[in-house]
Image (spheres, grey):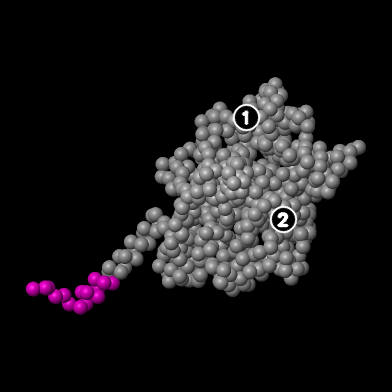
Amino acid sequence: MIPRFPSSYVRVSLVGLALLTIFWIVLAHRGNPKPWTAFPLLVVDPLAQELGHPTFPEIRFHERNLPQHVKPSLLAKGLLPQRLYFHRPRRPRYLYFAPKTSGLGWNNLLQEQLLNTHLAYLSQRAYVFSDHIPGDHAPFPDKLSTGARHQLHIPMNAFITGPTAGGPLSTDGSDRLARRAVSEEWWDIVCPPSQRVVVGFHQTMWELGLDEWSEAHDTMALWARKLRDIKAPCVSVEGGSPWNVNYPNLISLWPSYSTSPVLTAFAWSPLITAALFRNFRILSPSPPPPSVFPVTTKPYRFQSFAPYRPSTPPIYGLLGVHIRRGDFAHHCSGLADIGLEYNAWNQLGSPGITTRPTRYNSTLPPGFTWPVLPDHLDVPGGQSRKSAIFTHCWPTVDSMRSRIKSIRDEAASGKSFSPQTLRRIYMATDGSAEWVESMTELLRADGWEVSSSLDMDLSFEEYAVSQAVDMAVLTAAESFIGAGFSSLTSNVVQLRLAGGRQPGTIHFW
């Protein structure tokens, strides 16, 4: 005889089973996040295999399993813990910029991506990040046996973590998950073309009364207001972004941008941290600090290293220098002909920066002071501006050697900051092996212990992002000398300042 139970018991049991199932799903998502909407099957690119390109499978797995990659309808139904998402049950709002496919290097793109992430943050939208596809200076050969080009695809989280790469918008993880950046792959799933509102870049600039000479403060504020007012969840900006390579009036944005989570929560990827740990012996005689040591809890599945933050203590005794060689001489000639200023944040050394732009000084955050860099694009007496630009852009070996010595003496004096005893140099450079060896010999004759980009022991994946490895060293060095016209130097400058490095430790050739 089959036992029979009162119907009330059955109802209670079913409700309990449903609650237990929901609890198990939520708990599983928190402990080992998995996307609620299936991504397409992740397959290895056979053409990438033919070329021997790294495919970053663990990092791609990590990006797919970012906790914000969750079916939007489940968010509105409140099936996930409220603290993980948002306080009002509405669909996340996204901001996508069509990626540039050629003509710009990674650091030019990074400048735009960081500023576009800040724009998304002010617009109350989640930024959409994309792979980096090296158009120029590819780290590996990318021509197939047929002669066709098959470009390398590098995931964002191979370079960085933090708000631009889908990380938290706060250092303690208390932000709303629906505001975190998502991958372009997820954007294609939750925002199919039929649901996208396209915003034309050029048309919008005209409508807002803006151009490339407008103050960045105005540009950011007007774009943010427009994007906030669009009700559609999926917004795609096409035709460009407000921040071109040499935006001339960027400085007015620094007071708000410097305190944005985009910079304050920025970190280099665990892949970069691993490279720093393995190569720390050439950067310092001391053992690696805890910030670059392997972690035991493995917070990131694809590496047993934590992200490396620019706010960590510096590598004491290290002077980082960025020296552009290679084809930069031709580029410097062009810059001299145009009469261009220093790149982006390198202009924070311009005279009078504490009093201009004056219209924004009345609304500065409480306690804010402008970070005045000690160097700027000066024109020595008896020299034309064109000649001065070329001299700053393409310094001679003798002038660099002299400059390095003067920075060492200045750092030891303690005039602008606590005294530094600089003994080691790290040269981040694209110079030839012969040139680097010659420069190394000259510096060693001056008493320096010298290492360079060419000395780094990098894995296949780390080599693909070797620029970022160099930049992590430059942000960590006690003092830094950079190339004023370089976007790499400009990015190092903003990360050093946002990480708390003293402005007086930042110099240019």
At which x and y percent is residue 373? 73, 44
Q: Are marks 1 and 2 in contact (CB under 8 Å)?
A: no
Disc sitting over residue 218 in the figure: none
Q: Amino acid at mark 1?
A: Ser
Q: Nearer the viewer, residue 113 or 239?
A: 239
Q: Earlier in the sequence, mark 1 or mark 2?
A: 2
Q: Which residues are magenta?
A: 1-15
Residue 2 highlighted magenta (yes or no): yes
Residue labelled with disc 2: 244
Residue 281's place in the image compared with 259, above or below, is above
Residue 214's place in the image compared with 54, above or below, is below
Residue 219's place in the image compared with 43, above or below, is below
Q: Is residue 294 left or right of residue 136?
A: left
Q: Is residue 430 visible?
A: yes
Q: Nearer the viewer, residue 308 or 333?
A: 333
Residue labelled with disc 1: 451
